[in-house]
């Protein structure tokens, strides 16, 4: 078990374990397990009943709470870093307006190295948080005095990690 290994070798681990989070997803929909935070991993040992953290297939409990896959199953991954992840969207984002699409990794590099001020959002059209910012980002692009771009990060995960300071 991971926590046995962490304890035995005193491996540094995520500080949120001490606040009741067995698995760390994104901040918007990750909760402690159990939700009252009564189980914690502090100073290389459990406080409270570790069962909710250690039950079979519980390594992702608390992540993506309230989200579902297209088939109705419980979502356990955001998908941006999962090859072949199901894409549940019916259109791209920012199809009209002043947000400019970056068509290739070469174009993205050219923009970042141009020395000209610009904003690039790395996004996935199926991501609910990207969808949620669509209107505000479009409005920003209309009002900005600089070029505003979009780049599909889910299709170029290694590139955006290495070149656009973006990780999932």
Image: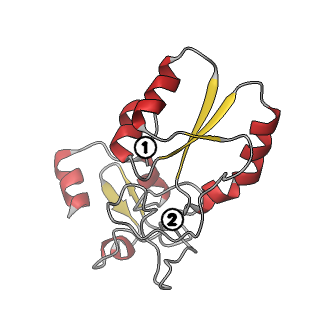
Residue 127 badge: none
Q: Relative to 109, does residue 49 appear above or below in the rendering?
A: below
**Going 53% across and 39% down the picture, which residue do you hit?**
102
- In the rendered image, the residue lying farthest to the right is 143
Look at the numbered disc 2 and give the secondary structure of its residue: loop
Q: Residues within 10 Å of mark 1 (few under 14, many from 20)?
A: few
**Going 46% across and 31% down the picture, which residue do you hit?**
107
**Going 56% across and 59% down the picture, which residue do you hit?**
125
Q: Nearer the viewer, residue 69 or 39?
A: 69
Quadrant containing the N terminus is bottom left
Look at the numbered disc 1 and give the secondary structure of its residue: loop
Q: Which residue is mark 2?
A: 32
Q: x, y percentage for residue 40?
A: 42, 61
Q: Nearer the viewer, residue 102 or 118?
A: 102
Q: x, y percentage for residue 95?
A: 66, 53
Frontmost of labels 1 and 2 is 1
Dots 1 and 2: beta carbons under 8 Å? no
From mark 1 to mark 2, how far is it between C-alphas? 23 Å
Image position of 16 (left or right of 51) = right
Q: x, y percentage for residue 2?
A: 23, 59
Q: Relative to 124, does residue 64 appear above or below in the rendering?
A: below
Q: Nearer the viewer, residue 35 or 127?
A: 127
Residue 167 badge: 1
């Amino acid at each position: 078990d991971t926590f046995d290994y962490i304890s035995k070798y005193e491996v540094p681990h995520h500080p949120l374990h001490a606040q009741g989070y067995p698995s760390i997803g994104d901040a918007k929909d990750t909760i402690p397990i159990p939700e009252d935070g009564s189980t914690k991993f502090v100073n290389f040992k459990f406080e409270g009943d570790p069962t909710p953290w250690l039950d079979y297939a519980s390594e992702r409990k608390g992540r993506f709470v309230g989200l579902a896959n297209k088939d109705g199953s419980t979502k356990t991954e955001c998908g941006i870093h999962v090859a072949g992840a199901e894409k549940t969207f019916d259109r791209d984002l920012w199809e009209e307006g002043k947000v400019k699409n970056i068509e290739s990794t070469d174009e993205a590099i050219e923009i970042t190295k141009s020395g000209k001020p610009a904003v690039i959002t790395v996004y996935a059209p199926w991501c609910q948080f990207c969808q949620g910012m669509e209107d505000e980002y479009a409005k920003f692009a209309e009002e900005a005095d600089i070029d505003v771009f979009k780049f599909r990060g889910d299709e170029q995960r290694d590139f955006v990690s290495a070149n656009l300071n973006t990780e999932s």
